[in-house]
Amino acid sequence: MPVELFDNKSADALPIHLVAKDGLENSGLATAVVAWAKANGFAGETGKVLAVPGTDGKIAGALFGTGQQESGLGFGVLARNLPEGDWHFSTQPAHPELAALGVALGGYAFTRYGKKPGKDIRLVAPAGVDLARLNRLVDAVSLVRDLVNTPTNDMGPSALEAVARKLAGAHGAEVRVTVGDDLLKHNFPMIHAVGRASADAPRLIDLTWGPKDAPKITLVGKGVCFDTGGLDIKPASSMLLMKKDMGGAANVLGLASMIMSAKLNVRLRVLIPAVENSISANAFRPGDVLQSRKGITVEIGNTDAEGRLVLADALALADEEQPELLIDMATLTGAARVALGPDLPPFYTGDEVLAGELSAASAAVEDPIWRMPLWKPYDAKLSSKIADMNNVTTDGFAGSITAALFLKRFVEKTPGWAHFDIFAWNPTERPHGPIGGEAQAIRALERVISARFG
């Protein structure tokens, strides 16, 4: 992480002056600094950064434009535009924790394959900020980004298992993994069916942590490490980002990292069906009927709708325990992107209290999510003439909603369930993150879980 957050201001830490749009005259800055800003066309526009020289010609500080309304994560542009060195805010930002978080996240760079890291910047955390918590969030988001950015040749099902084991080892958690044909022995037939065509065997990763008598929280993440579409093969252009199809798994591991690092009083369980949807002689086919762990039979209308199949077996297992909170996260449908775009993941839940908490947390921490309806009349679209249900609809409408309704069939006992249909990717640069893998919804979830169980 190029940006380091620390809590003791050194004598060398340079000031960052916050300037509102057209607020130079009332900023309290020295006359010479105001003149310098005007000479360089700086007027406090959102995200604009201007270094300020001292009388000796060296950098004496920087101006940062907050625009009409200050955005916490918008401070992330500072990580890419400030000169290297130690910095502090000369005045308290309106949202100090988000401002510091934005800078830290904005300095992220994926360096595994030789890309150079960003600038060496250190920022004094604003007064009153819980630095330990802030670092937990930064570490978790960085983990998610690293996992999603890693291509499948280095992040297949077995490598994803290794990541889960490493995370578990760091926090004293336990991991059990069911691999290959053992999935059939332990009644996970749909996970097996989707992943059996790959040379890297399918598996169910099962991580547990925390006191056994504590409230149970279960996180389920779609771990499709690459999705060719199966026999209903995707066009080449649609496969270019399929390394990110394990973004749900990456995000639940990031959320698990936050929970375990904070030592929340919960019994945490993380379930990741890790597969590669490949093409081989033993690949599952359109028209096949699969048994599920729950006993529901599923006709395969399209092998490219595989994520809901592996999630269904994992959700059925999770539901058997009836946890107090059950969250699943998946890069599940293109329909969610059509409806809400890449930056605004939809979530689905029948729990009105949970929905309210999530929406409030989303706004508070600038982690956008949007509730979509579990519209019961659309459930009939998943009907099959020969099985209990089909894995897709025939009309192509309401794809994200019908996918959520498919999953809902496998969660019967747990009222506190929510499904997140995430994108896990920044298609364009954002103030707090470059193009590439992204953590979505987990900071909002962390706030809800901490409030409930902290």
Image (cartoon, rainbow, N blue to C red):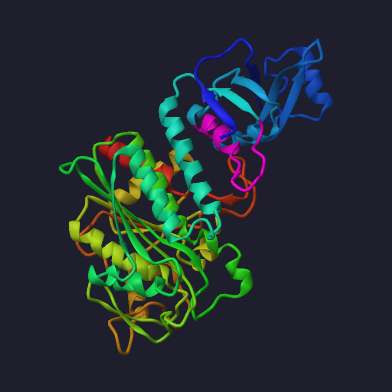
**Can residue 371 be seen by looking at this rendering?**
no
How far across and how far down the image is residue 384, in percent? 33, 85
Name the quadrant of the N terminus.
Answer: top right
Taking 86 as reference, is 3 above or below it? below
Q: How many marks?
A: 0
Q: To which quarter of the image does residue 224 belong?
A: bottom left
How far across and how far down the image is residue 94, in percent? 52, 27
Residue under the point 45% across and 78% down: 303
- Magenta stretch in the rendered image: 98-119
Taking 283 as reference, is 309 above or below it? above
Taking 390 as reference, is 221 above or below it? above
**Most foreground residue, 180 or 303:** 180
Residue at the far left in the pictured view:
213
Determine if the magenta segment contains residue 238.
no
Name the quadrant of the C terminus.
Answer: top left
How far across and how far down the image is residue 156, in percent? 47, 60
Q: On the rendered structure, is 55 left or right of 45?
A: right
How far across and how far down the image is residue 433, in percent? 59, 43
Residue under the point 48% across and 44% down: 143
Q: On the rendered structure, is 271 left or right of 241?
A: left
**Can residue 263 be seen by looking at this rendering?**
yes
Determine if the magenta segment contains residue 112.
yes
Taking 63 as reference, is 220 above or below it? below
